[in-house]
Image (cartoon, rainbow, N blue to C red):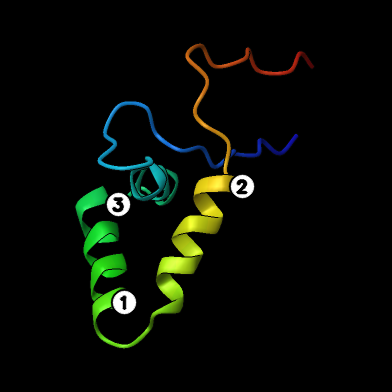
Amino acid sequence: MTTYRQLYRSNKNRMVGGVCSGLGEFFGIDPTVVRLLFVFGVLFGIGSMAIVYLVMLMVVPEEPLVLPPPPAE
């Protein structure tokens, strides 16, 4: 059976909304790298990155305090 991972906004390592931390945890990279990519994207002409961040802030659910147990087989 395939286990699916869920993208959440992080509660542990958040700066503003937890979007970049959540993406970093999901992809297994340092959240600082994701934050820098977002900042460079906003500053150097890809203004849609700010819109992407705001949409993700509204759409991606916040990480639950206690993760639900895995489904029984």
- At 79% from the left and 17% from the top, the residue drawn is 73
- Mark with earlier residue (2, 1): 1
State yes or no: discs 2 and 1 in contact (Cβ < 8 Å). no
Residue 34 x/y as whole percent: 29, 59
Q: In this rendering, is residue 42 above or below 6? A: below
Quadrant housing the N terminus: top right
- Mark with earlier residue (3, 1): 3
- Mark with earlier residue (3, 2): 3
Q: CA distance from mark 3 to mark 2?
A: 21 Å
Q: In the structure shown, which secondary structural element does the residue marked by tag 2 occupy?
A: helix
- At 66% from the left and 35% from the top, the residue drawn is 3
Residue that mark 1 sits on: 41
Front residue of 36 and 69: 36
Dot 3 alpha-carbon crowd within 10 angstroms: few under 14, some 14 to 19, many 20 or more: few
Q: Could you say which disc has been placed on residue 29 in the image?
A: 3
Q: CA distance from mark 2 to mark 1?
A: 20 Å
Residue type at mark 2: give it.
Val
Residue 44 x/y as whole percent: 25, 85
Q: Could you say which disc has been placed on residue 59 in the image?
A: 2
Residue type at mark 3: give it.
Ile
Q: CA distance from mark 3 to mark 1?
A: 18 Å
Q: With 7 as the anchor, is 1 left or right in this view?
A: right
